[in-house]
Image (tube, rainbow, N blue to C red):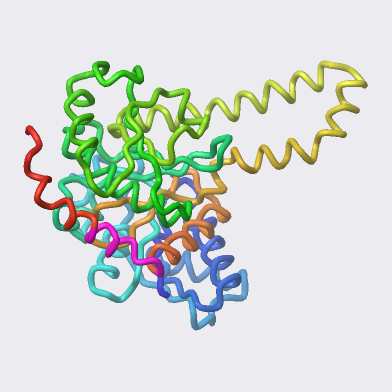
Amino acid sequence: MKIAVDAMGGDFAPLEIVLGSIEAIRENPHMEVVLVGDEQQIFTILKENNEQKNPRITVYHASEVIGMDEHPAQALRKKKDASVVVATALVKDKQCDAVIAPGSTGAAVAAALFGLGRIKGIDRPTIATPIPTVNGVTVMLDSGANANSKPKHLVQGALMGSEYAKLLLGKANPTVGLLNIGEEASKGNEVVLATYPFLKKLKTISFYGNVEGRDIPKGTVDVVVCDGFVGNVVLKFAEGLVTAVAQLVKDGIMAGGIFAKLGALLVKPAIKKIGKRLDHTENGGAPLLGVNGVFIICHGSSKAKEIKTAINIAGDLVDRKIIEHIQKTIEVEGAFKYEYDE
């Protein structure tokens, strides 16, 4: 297993990206990584960690980087030697099995689309993000790839999300819900109203019906489908809420006197377990489903732990043949896919 890692993407590149890659191969003796980016900076970090001669770490030089504030399509046209572009090309050319892309989500999606192309039958790729719930994990998609989706994009997302949930959750028939402002089939905007009957007709998913925002943390369904604008707002709100609640609890304990502090010590182990479940860094990254290759998008603020986890996720998806599973599902539903209203 050989994973291409964009070592220059994100707020803490290349240090945290390289450290996370080192941790991943130390834990997994069957894994190799190709670090793509400024070779001088990367080699310096490897040398500082006594990994400069590790045969399972390769450095592939790329002279350019796409910044978080750059327009993705324009940057891709101008920067042909950008690290995310070069890393993606390594997968396209079969030199690597998957890509890890921290940094600009827009640049990552564009690089994957232009570099790997789409799976036949998929119009737009979608980002599938695991969200911790009281019942385990719910996969939400799209969480940021497409701000404006049509019914066919949501239907294709449901198909891909269901296949991903089967691999991630180990469930033979995961339930799929359509995110809406109410449970009734008559509610929602034009896109959601048009999507509902199509989802009911699908043969390869277990469609639950409409779900509301509160159903996500409750774990009402295994997969939640929405457009990328709504999904990204939900995701960022959830991340901010967890941080805010943790701070409020801490402030309350500090202001509560000696008994509050003693009580906090007693429940500290339980709080740590809850915090770990809610920590978005435990997920590492989210797969971009629908492109013709395993492509993991990481948060722009990713540190070593998240990169290590993302590499492990990528290896798992390659092993479990996620692309082949999606292709098979699309083929089964193939006669239906062109019936969507544009």
The percent coordinates of residue 169 (x first, y second) are: 48, 51
Q: Looking at the picture, how far across and down is residue 82, in whole percent?
A: 29, 58
Q: Residue at x 53, y 28 (%)?
A: 240
Q: Quadrant of the N terminus?
A: bottom left
Relative horizontal placement of residue 161, taking residue 264 as reference (left or right): left
Out of 258 and 107, give the one closest to the viewer. Answer: 258
Say which of 337 and 251 sits in front. 337
Q: Quadrant of residue 5?
A: bottom left
Asked if residue 69 can be seen in this view, the reply is no
Q: Which quadrant would the C terminus be assigned to in this image? A: top left
- Magenta span: predominant SS is helix
**What's the residue at 13%, 52% (across, down)?**
334
Quadrant housing residue 338? top left
Vertical side of 4 occupied by 202: above or below:
above
The structure residue drawn at horizontal position 52% and vertical position 30%, both measured from the top left corner, is 218
* Direction from residue 138 to residue 65 in the image, left or right: left
- Measuring from the top left, give residue 318's x and y in whole percent: 38, 67
Range of magenta residues: 319-328
